[in-house]
Image (cartoon, helix red, strand yellow):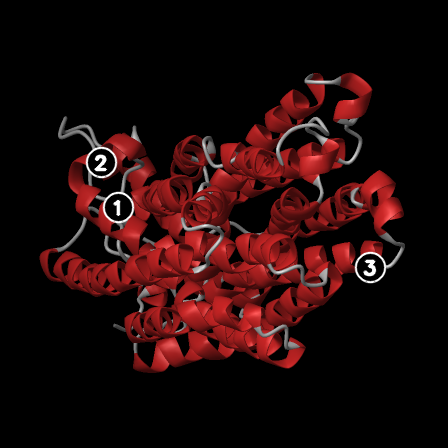
């Protein structure tokens, strides 16, 4: 079989990593714009004025949560296409879906204008966003990881992960900018601008992605499939052939890896929204802190994440991605209480320092996870496997994290310690599960897999 990987341009790993970054940045920008708006403005725009304040807040976060309901379905549908056809095509489709839905959110009428139809339309568009993002992450990760040189999968995989911090930076930056026009302008029209502006970013992303090369792993898989199709001995599918139903194969052979992967990612997904969306609500509603001050702090934290993630990923290639993730999770356990405790002081310096510290340790556990999960599944079902782990985690933990945090806090009279304690417990479980993922990876390499991954995608453990 010809070595298709070596025939590619030497700059291909960087080109595909940049393409993954540009697309995920746009999609996460749209996603975080919704999360930010749900925290500070959707309760007043899309729900009746006479609704109790706590119920409005929970309802606004619930619209954020419903987007996670379709994320596993998006992972299965687009994972199926990505494993059978290729990674590139799915990335173009998901980007278009996300962009159209986000632009439409910026045009929605308010509750005062059309009544209950307003939140219904918001939920429908949110579901489309969830379906799109469900298929986006796995493809972007694999395009970067599977084009990476040997021993650099964690580093190049982190480029797709950087889309989260770039998207958060752009989103919080846009909302901070719109806040400068004053509360009245922001509530009337300012919150719409970040959603409408996403149209420009989507066009840029589509231009980049349509020029994207597919993964070399797909070349190998399709070559094996053609070889299998020519087999006249009646032995059926050989090693390397495309899986007819990837999700069934994953659930049959790798369900333990999926389950452990879900809990390994819980803090990186659900915990993120606790220390961003819920923290924003807690700081403004319960501690009456300046909304602009907190948004500026989150913007600085996102910028720090953008800077440190590649270096932490390089550290993962050097000492082991699992060790970096475990260290990040331990940091979250230590910082969960201080993150909220400093809100009582009202000190901008202390609040910003804890925001930065928390985002640093979360960067350590989020960036390397792309490579860790990719190594947990055989290449011909890898898109489906990592998407299922990631999106089920988002459904269970991330989607309902802000709502659950508000509910737990309300049970304790508005205290911060129940959400902070829950974050500590989830992070401790994540440490154990990340170590289990390392064990499963080693077993797969020792016993062999339906397809042996090319050398260039091997992650040092």
Residue at disc 1, secondary structure: helix
Residue at disc 2, secondary structure: helix
Verify CB contact (< 8 Å) between mark 1 and mark 2.
yes
Q: Residue furthest front?
A: 413
Image quarter of residue 125: top right
- Residue in the image at 61% along x and 24% along y: 124
Single out the mark in the foreground, 3 or 2: 3
Residue 75 or 112: which is nearer the viewer?
112
Disc number for residue 251: 2
Residue 20 in sight in this render: no
Disc number for residue 177: 3
Disc number for residue 258: 1
On screen, residue 423 versus residue 437, left or right, reads right
On screen, residue 151 versus residue 181, left or right, reads left
Residue 262 or 1: which is nearer the viewer?
262
Q: Is residue 370 above or below residue 201?
A: below
Image quarter of residue 276: bottom right
- In x, y percent, where is residue 259? 24, 46
Q: Quadrant of the C terminus?
A: bottom left
- In x, y percent, where is residue 149? 42, 70
Query: Nearer the N terminus, badge 3 or badge 1?
Result: 3
Query: Nearer the N terminus, badge 1 or badge 2?
Result: 2
């Amino acid at each position: 079989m010809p070595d298709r990987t070596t025939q590619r341009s030497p700059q291909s790993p960087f080109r595909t990593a940049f393409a993954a970054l540009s697309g995920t940045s746009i999609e996460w920008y749209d996603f975080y714009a919704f999360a930010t708006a749900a925290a500070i403005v959707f309760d007043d725009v899309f729900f009746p004025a006479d609704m109790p304040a706590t119920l409005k807040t929970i309802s606004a976060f619930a619209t954020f949560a419903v987007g996670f309901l379709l994320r596993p379905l998006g992972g299965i549908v687009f994972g199926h296409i990505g494993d059978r056809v290729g990674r590139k095509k799915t990335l173009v489709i998901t980007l278009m879906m996300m962009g159209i839905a986000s632009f439409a959110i910026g045009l929605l009428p308010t509750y005062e204008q059309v009544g209950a139809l307003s939140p219904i339309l918001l939920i429908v568009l949110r579901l489309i966003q969830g379906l799109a993002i469900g298929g986006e992450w796995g493809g972007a990760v694999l395009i970067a990881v599977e084009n990476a040189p040997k021993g650099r999968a964690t580093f190049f995989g982190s480029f797709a992960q950087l889309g989260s911090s770039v998207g958060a930076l752009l989103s919080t930056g846009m909302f901070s900018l719109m806040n400068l026009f004053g509360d009245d302008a922001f509530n009337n029209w300012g919150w719409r601008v970040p959603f409408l502006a996403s149209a420009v970013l989507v066009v840029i992303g589509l231009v980049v992605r349509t020029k994207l090369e597919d993964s070399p792993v797909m070349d190998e898989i399709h070559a094996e499939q053609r070889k299998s199709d020519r087999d006249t001995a009646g032995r059926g599918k050989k090693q390397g052939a495309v899986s007819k139903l990837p999700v069934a194969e994953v659930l049959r052979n790798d369900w333990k890896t999926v389950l452990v992967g879900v809990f390994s990612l819980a803090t990186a997904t659900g915990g993120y929204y606790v220390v961003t969306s819920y923290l924003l609500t807690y700081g403004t509603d319960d501690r009456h802190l300046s909304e602009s001050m907190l948004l500026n702090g989150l913007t600085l934290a996102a910028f720090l994440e953008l800077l440190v993630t590649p270096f932490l990923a390089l550290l993962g290639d050097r000492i082991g991605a699992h060790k970096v993730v475990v260290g990040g999770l331990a940091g979250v356990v230590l910082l969960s209480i201080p993150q909220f405790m400093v809100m009582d002081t009202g000190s901008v310096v202390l609040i910003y320092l804890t925001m930065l510290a928390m985002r640093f340790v979360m960067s350590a556990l989020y960036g390397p996870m792309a490579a860790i999960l990719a190594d947990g599944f055989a290449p011909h079902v890898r898109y489906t496997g990592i998407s299922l782990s990631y999106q089920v985690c988002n459904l269970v933990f991330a989607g309902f994290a802000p709502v659950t945090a508000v509910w737990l806090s309300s049970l304790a009279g508005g205290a911060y310690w129940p959400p902070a304690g829950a974050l500590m417990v989830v992070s401790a479980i994540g440490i154990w599960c990340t170590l289990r993922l390392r064990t499963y990876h080693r077993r797969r390499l020792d016993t062999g897999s339906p397809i042996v991954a090319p050398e260039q995608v091997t992650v040092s453990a």
